[in-house]
Amino acid sequence: MIRKERLVSTFLDLVKISSPSWKEEEVFRYIEKAADGLGLECRRAKCGPSHNLVVRMAGDTSRKPLMFGAHADTVTPCDNVKPVMRGNRITSDGTTILGGDDKAAIAAFIEAMRVIREHNIQTPPIEWVFTCAEEIGLRGMKGMDFSMLKSKRAFIFDCSGPIGTVIARAPSQIIMHVDITGRAAHAGIEPEKGVSAIDIAAEIIMKLPRGRLDKETTSNVGMISGGRATNIVAEKASFDMEARSLDGKKLKTLEKKMIAIIKDTAKKRGGKAQVNSTLEYSSFNIPAKDPLIRVIDSACESIGAKMTVSSSGGGSDTNVLNAKGIRAINLSIGMSNVHSTREYIQISDLCKGCDLVVAIAAVG
């Protein structure tokens, strides 16, 4: 029922719009114009320097409302995107990202709204939720005004893989900022009087568990800085790291272990360490027999797609929704090589992803 040319045209329009985190205004206006043309209610909710957008579609009130979600921001470089169509594939020209993450989902949602209206498809009441600043820590969904939402179940389209891929399990993540204090001294005249914060940081990092720790858990030191000049034993150094695990209890144990390593090592070397650890988002695990899975399975069967249930090492708006008591699951929209200038999407996957949105709306 979808119109392929219209869907592709919408997608091409969207990816040409520059929309780094917090600067999604033009994308939201595009969505609002499409929704207004269908007579749908649009509501904005302030979030940081941007906002989130909720589009409401009336439906059968005897059925429980449902939510579809996508984010409006992209990673950079996203200025002056020039999409290139080669047969069944859409890419950028290689100098920017394409922006299929997550504009493929936005395009699919807009086309699904049109198809539902044009063919009078019977659905529950639907809330189409578009968030800002997802790419910089799920900031949009974390800042969402949840009093606006009636749905207690949500289908977020924000992952890669064949259409029908379902992320039913995703990790908790902590972010740690570590400040090391040593003692300054002249590096050429009396270095023995100094305590190098850089040396302490280096020793700590070498002791910390890093990389893939087990099949559920990872850890990474991503940034480090310190010192003022080559002729000064560095008094200050800092580094930033993260850890993730599908098992929240396991992550908490790892966090305690890492903090102990950091503080004990600094103390033994004659320095001090201050650790600021923040839980960025919590894990979720949707069981195989959950009604959400059954809806997706039925919808996939109706469009000839195979449902594949998997887990992910990444976070999404789905993590925030589950923590807020809204049962949510993440689905593929067919994007590939995201967050790189090699990003692409197959037109057939874009179309099939839209088919799945329409099918979920009908089945749900």
Image (cartoon, rainbow, N blue to C red):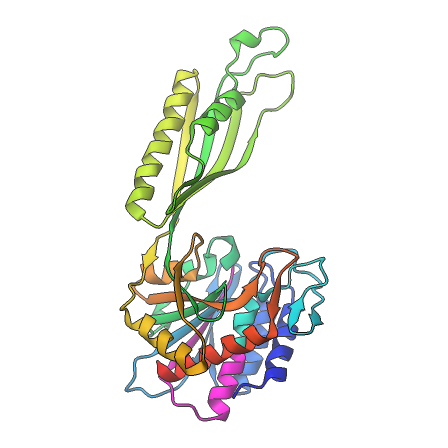
Q: Quadrant of residue 76?
A: bottom right
- In the rendered image, the vertical position of residue 190 relative to residue 18, given as above or below: above
Q: Is residue 21 above or below residue 2?
A: above
| Residue visible at 53% across and 84% down in the picture | 36
For the residue pair 361 and 136, the one nearer the viewer reads as 361
Q: Position of residue 301 (x, y in %)?
A: 40, 79
Residue found at x 42% / y 43% = 218
Instruction: Work out whether 194 lies above or below 47.
Output: above
Is residue 288 left or right of 240 when viewed as pictured? left
Tell me residue 363's x, y (percent): 36, 82
Classify 42 as above or below 341.
below
Q: Residue at x 38, y 46 (%)?
A: 215
Q: Residue at x 49, y 83 (%)?
A: 113
Q: Is residue 39 visible?
A: no
Q: Quadrant of the C terminus?
A: bottom left
Check if residue 127 falls in the magenta segment.
yes
Q: Say whether residue 195 is left or right of residue 7.
A: left
Whether residue 198 appears in magenta in the rendering, the answer is no
**Residue 196 picture location, percent across and down:** 52, 18
| Residue 181, image x, y percentages | 47, 23
The image quarter containing residue 295 is bottom left
**Highlighted magenta segment, given as a residue range:** 110-133
